[in-house]
Amino acid sequence: MFIKKIAKHTAMLTMAAAVSMSASSTYADSVNYIIPFGPGGESDISARIQQSFYKEKFGDDLVISYKPGGGGAAGWASLNGLNGDGQTIMGVNLPHIVIKPAQKDVGFTTGSIHTFYMFHYTPDAIVVIADSPYQTLQDLIDDAKSKPGGVVMSGSGKASANNLAQIKFDKMADINTTYVSFKGTGASTAALLGEQVTAQWGYTTVGAKQGKAVRMLAVAMEARHPLFPDVPTFKELGYDMVGGAYRGIALPSSASAETVTTWSNRIGEINADPAFRKKMISGGFALLDVDASQMSEFMKERTMEYLLDARAAGLIK
Amino acid sequence: MDFGNFLAALTPLNLAVAMFGVVAGTLIGSIPGLTATMAVAVLVPISFSMAPETALILLGAIYTGAIYGGAYAAILLNTPGTPSAIATTFDGYPLAKRGKGDLAVAIACFSSVFGGLVGAFALLFLAPPLASVALAFGPVEYFWLSIFGLSLIASLSQGNLMMGLAGGALGMIMSTVGVAEISADIRLTFGSQTMISGFEVVGAMIGLYCIPVLIDMCSTGEKHLKITGDVAKMPILSAARITFNSKFNLIRSSIIGTLVGILPGAGGSVAGLVAYTEAKRTAKPHQRFGEGEPDGIIATESANNATVGGGFIPTLVLGIPGTPPDAVILGALMVQGVRTGPELFQSNGSIVYTFIYGLLIATVLMLPIGLIIGRYAYKSIVTIPKAVLVPTVGFMTIIGTYAIRNSISDVVVMLCLGVFGWLISKYGFSASPIVLGLILGPIAEQGFVQAWTIGAAVNNLPGMFFGRPLSQGIIAVTLISLILPWYLSRKKQIKADT
Amino acid sequence: MIDSSAKAVAAAPTDRGSRLGSILVASLLIIIGFITLYDATSYTDVDSKVFPQTSAIALILFSTLAIGKQIVQPTAVSGIELGSWWRRIVLVSSMLLACALMPYTGLLIACVLTFTLGLIASMHDKWTNRKAIVYFLSGLSIIVCFYLLFKFALHVPLP
């Protein structure tokens, strides 16, 4: 009697397994794209957009999995232990992979992460709510000068892109604002919308998502963002700030030069697709095309820049 | 909001998708270690090829099914299948041990459906005003809310108050292990690389709840759960009767769940906890909470499913995810080019309303589906010989814990916590305060540090912490829930003495 | 939950051994509290210290009070009930063994081994050949099915 039951259950389970296997394509081809954060953040969203283009271009499945922990450290520390055959890739973020190892022993060094493509960045931006008394960047600066420390700005994470931007800008404008760190851009945006803080150090993606509910005072780009032609850049207003959080993809260090080139070309191809670019831009992202051949130069510049900024900010020694 | 959207939700494709979502979600949620977030994340790629409203219905159906499915393991194995089912173990497992596991599962089903409907109706009619309530909750309110949650631990540990509070404090310390969110320090890792990501909540939950049960089960030969009555038939009618007789509890808990779901960062676990404590506080004299009182299950299961609808409110109205599965769904929507936020209801109203109707339909479908799957789950767990059940569940804890962060060390930690939890449970300490401390710790810490930073910046610390009306309300409720039971029992004692 | 344990232990006698165990556990928690306080001295940012320190102090306080209560007005605790120790140890060790083996043999083989050991640990009835085969095969099929489910349907990269 028990045997019959077991047989019945086994048959059902096997059927279910077979159905699910056929529903997903053959496993041998699918690629594992690890995001070293939890789901829902900017890294996840941009990866999802890539995922939607990957299958039709290259035929395989791009499967996104998450390995959160330590603000990305858990994922990056494990990267070089993974299989380098090209079936596993991992998202990387600047300034995280530069600043974290410089602060403490987090299990990896900047040099140990072999990034092969930087495909976008989210430009820093100062965001206020639509009802805010600040109409221009100068309004914020004037207010900050009149009450040192009294202008409270939310941002995502400490020693992150937002934090660095806040410290850098404070120095440039000779003001003193207070930075409050939140867990993720969603939380820092909620604080802004709920008027828990005066303004937010966020990204252009916040402006894109929130639309008319917010106003961006300035963006840290070379030229104005196509989605926001009315928002000036910091440079126009006299502050040399261009940057944000950069995102790219890396392979384990054991990957061969061929694998690296193949992947660099694949991501480059997705990046060049006009439909992909349109989706990214309409989400507020800004695209970047740094492939494997240009990577070491790019990383050298960025590393120097970030370490300089972080040292000046007192975030590292 | 016209009839057309409702009809759109009833197309064969959308109905099929709703049904598939509920079935898949319930099954995935019932496996400890597989969370609603995972369930949703896995099926996101399939949603790309669908129209936005169909994709939303699929993901929403999975989400609500998973929250319900967590009750099975909670009731039958004392292990929450998802964190939102933690409070269901309080009365679910004792009821199962008394031989009424099938009744418990059926009650859980009815309550989940009711709670889910309340949450979905709130989404349908009250989304914009409720979204502004969500925004009014700042760091200070989150801090006081977590203090309230921790005070609930005290009220739940009445027999062993000091031990319960110690457990909660231990949980809070455990939540600080690893890289600090609010600063760049690394805490309590003692140089080890493994603990840098901290204690993973679901793994710790499985370890502290499930492993002790397994150890106990294998050490004696008795049957795991008593069976009373016919295993093949579910006591559907009596479950329905019991559930709907408790109208006040049902409605109150569903509202609590909806409101907690609106707050980004608070989830089903907090909702279940608050609803349970409220139900216990207003219990009638003959009710014995903690020993298999059906009202306990009604409270937690309706509250946690209400968070599904509630969580969609800030997600759709503000573009800010109410709960982790909402974050994944937001991502999927972004890929589809659907912009959430204030624009959504205006420019894409038909998508939103079709989705909400679809969610309502999926929740209603959960009733028959949930009862069927529930009966199957009950039968299997109760009739499988213990010798097979124990290693099978052991295997599932391993594979489930691994799957959360793809980490073997999480599994080892889970097992160590399991042994530790088993040991201390023999000496008066219980798993729930520790797990609740682990969940509420980060909320309390971040809220406190953020509130302190802002308060110090505007030179008004006392005003920051005590001067805001919403915080004052939460503080008042906390004090009442701490003092009232003590006061009432004193009054009873005095009356008895005279 | 906790009330039910209170009811259960009201029936059990207040046995000295169990009370001692309870005091030992509370002492362990106090030690954990002090370790936390010690570690907190090494943090660079003031913000990171507040919460662990407060929680550690709370832990030490409550554990001390718990010990006090046990001495003055003992609440009975269940203690470790009768039951076979070797089974408990085999069960737990088999699961830890799986973790140790997983990087080398892969999850499937490690878990099959664990299942077998766990089966032996949990089997209280007499073994018959038939039972051995049926139980083992059923477990095997469940393991394989879930492995397939996780690996292919859910795309979890299992070792």
Image (tube, rainbow, N blue to C red):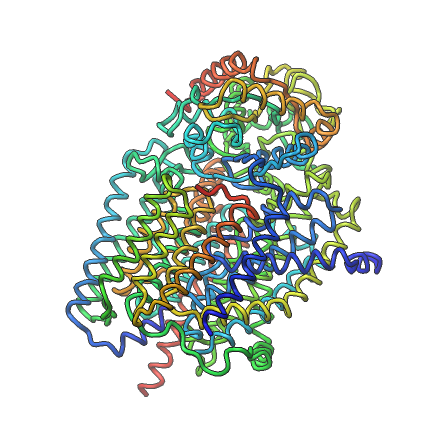
In the rendered view of the protein, which quadrant contains the C terminus of chain A?
A: top left
At x 40% / y 51%, what residue is drawn? B398
Is residue A156 placed above or below B294 in the rendered structure? Answer: above
Q: Where is residue C136 shown, x and y percent of the image?
A: 39, 61
Q: Where is residue C91 shown, x and y percent of the image?
A: 30, 58
| Relative depth, front residue between B309 and B224 | B224
Task: Determine the image quadrant of residue C24.
Answer: bottom left
Q: Where is residue B414 shown, x and y percent of the image?
A: 36, 50
Left/right of residue B52 with respect to residue B446 in the rendered view: right
Is residue B199 placed above or below C3 in the rendered structure? Answer: above
| Relative depth, front residue between B212 and C9 | B212
At x 20% / y 76%, what residue is drawn? C13
Asked if residue C58 shows in the view, the reply is: yes
At x 53% / y 35%, what residue is drawn? A35
Left/right of residue B163 with respect to residue A179 in the rendered view: left
Is residue C73 placed above or below A100 in the rendered structure? Answer: below
Q: Where is residue B225 shown, x and y percent of the image?
A: 40, 74
Residue reaching furthest bottom? B498
